[in-house]
Amino acid sequence: TTVSMPSLHEVNGMLRLAGNPALKTLELPRLGSLNGYSVVKDNSALETVSLPALGAVNGVFDILSNSRLRALSLGAIGGVNGSLRIQDNASLLEADLHELAVVNGRLSVLHNPQLGLLKLDRLSKLRGRVEIKFHPRLDDSRLRLLGAVLQLQTSFNSVDIGHNGSN
């Protein structure tokens, strides 16, 4: 089963896709912003999440415990004002956040044991916390992070990268 909403541009409030055992693909090709609480959780057959136009998360966006999720495409996201959590997706191979530049809040990428490539090339401003932990297949050469970590502009925050492949 595929959930596709080709005309959806914005969510103000709640978007919840949880506990759908037949859902294989989530496609929201024109969704530009999530404002409120959004969760994609416990969808045991979900393999692909594609939100190629998502530019901003204003609130909370959780992608949790989707055991067959292999590909996560959030390549246009430029900013998080709140929280973006990608956690406990047992089959996740790649997470594309290559346009993410600003985090005001929290970015957590945790316990995705097959994650081999995380694209975070442009992250340059942080006011909050970034956690990237517990990915045995994610070594330094596959963690495309921050361009240069030492040039990251930070304010009362922390960056915690650990327990990955070669760290």
Image: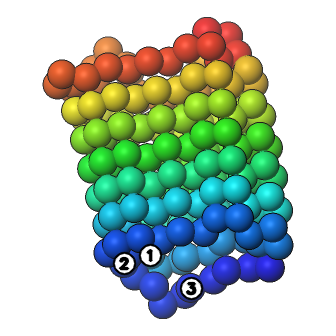
Q: Label 3 belongs to which residue?
A: 5
Residue furthest to the left in view is: 155
Residue furthest to the top in view is: 167
Quadrant, the C terminus: top right
Residue furthest to the bottom in view is: 7
Q: Label 2 belongs to which residue?
A: 10
Q: Amino acid at mark 3?
A: Met
Q: Name the residue rendered at 53%, 68% in the picture.
A: 16
Under circle 3, the secondary element is loop
Foreground of the two, 123 or 111 = 111
Q: Earlier in the sequence, mark 3 or mark 2?
A: 3
| Rendering coords of residue 143 (x, y %) | 58, 27
Q: Is the residue marked by circle 2 packed among few (<14), some (14-19), or many (20+) residues within 10 Å?
A: some
Q: Amino acid at mark 2?
A: Glu
- Gap in Å between the C-alphas at discs 3 and 1? 9 Å
Quadrant, the N terminus: bottom right
The reply to whether residue 76 is in sight is: no
Q: Name the residue rendered at 74%, 79% in the picture.
A: 2
Q: Give residue 31's mark.
A: 1
Quadrant in the rendering for residue 48: bottom right
- Up the image or down, 86 lies above or below 41; here it is above
Task: Locate residue 66 relative to residue 32 in the image: left or right.
Answer: right
| Rendering coords of residue 90 (x, y %) | 77, 40
Q: Name the residue rendered at 66%, 30% in the picture.
A: 111
Task: Locate residue 138 relative to residue 32 in the image: left or right.
Answer: right
Quadrant in the rendering for residue 115: top right
Q: Amino acid at mark 1?
A: Leu
